[in-house]
Amino acid sequence: MDTSLICPRFENAISILSQRWTGLIIYQLLAGPQRFSQLTEAIGISGRLLSERLKNLEANGLVIRSVYPETPVRIEYRLTEKGIALKPVMDEIQSWSQTWVEPIETK
Amino acid sequence: MDTSLICPRFENAISILSQRWTGLIIYQLLAGPQRFSQLTEAIGISGRLLSERLKNLEANGLVIRSVYPETPVRIEYRLTEKGIALKPVMDEIQSWSQTWVEPIETK
DNA sequence: CCATTTAGTTACTTTATGTAACTAATGTTA
DNA sequence: TAACATTAGTTACATAAAGTAACTAAATGG
């Protein structure tokens, strides 16, 4: 159905942010540029999905991928201006979570 | 994997908000209490998923379900204080989307 | 007692995600 | 120079979530 009455820009924004993992990836990159393996470890995502999400974020202009031909190769992901502009969103989620949310349970 | 280095409360918050549709449902309910069919039409979600999401939001203390035995029955969903507290998050997403996002394409 | 209205549920298909093993590129070491 | 190490992925396959459409339940009106 596409009879939505909700603002199309907002809807588009939500469709990016409500994809699994993208919130955490952006949050993590707000701390500074990071390489693939760092992201994998920090947020606990598989290589397959991280790769897919980063490509998607790049395509959406939120993330830039840079290759440094060192040994071994270093590939760094960092936020664009558009990506950094999501900091207030993340800050508000952070703030809400401190007031209202219990820590996730680790069984 | 659960070796995440990210704040557990934040992670829990993201796990609620990054679920498909929940953002739109909360956004929509911020405009005021609404019945099932209104939500369906406003955000373009199927009954099956709306039902599932509303149960989940209720279980997470974000939404309250009230039954009014009129004819035909009216069932109203509204945000709790915890749910209303997400307004600043939605406002920031809204604001970001106005600056950085194109309207979603309707093919 | 048949029709209407709202609020769902059920059964089934399609898409997304999780998992683990594998590959590519590059340089280092025996 | 052949085997090894390291990073950054990709592939193939299993499982879980989401989409779709038809169906059910409860309550009243005709």
Image (tube, coloured by chain):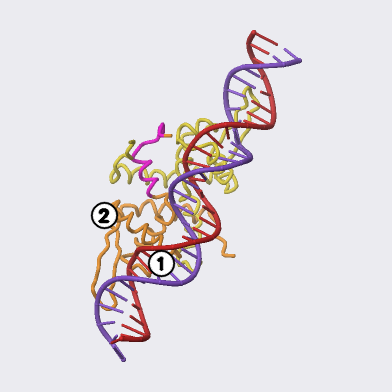
Chain colours: A yellow, B orange, C red, D purple
Instruction: Please give the residue where the numbered disc 2 appears in the rendered image.
Output: B81
Q: Position of residue A46 (x, y in %)?
A: 51, 37
Chain letter for the residue marked with disc 2 in the picture: B
The residue at 40%/34% (across/down) is: B2
Up/down of B60 relative to D30, above or below: above
- Amino acid bearing label 1: Thr
Question: Please, what secondary structure does the residue beneath circle 1 have?
Answer: helix
Where residue B44 sits, quadrant-wise, is bottom left
Q: Amino acid at mark 2?
A: Glu
Distance CA(mark 2)–CA(mark 1): 23 Å
Residue B84 appears in the rendering: no
Residue identifier under label 1: B40
Q: Residues within 10 Å of mark 2 (few under 14, many from 20)?
A: few
Tag 1 subunit: B
Residue A86 in the image, given as x and y percentages of width and height: 46, 46
N-terminal-most mark, 2 or 1: 1
Quarter of the image for residue A75 reads top right
Q: Secondary structure at mark 2?
A: helix
Q: Are marks 2 and 1 on the same chain?
A: yes
Q: Nearer the viewer, residue B63 or B97?
A: B63
Q: Is residue A45 above or below residue B93?
A: above
Relative to A106, does residue B34 appear above or below in the rendering?
A: below
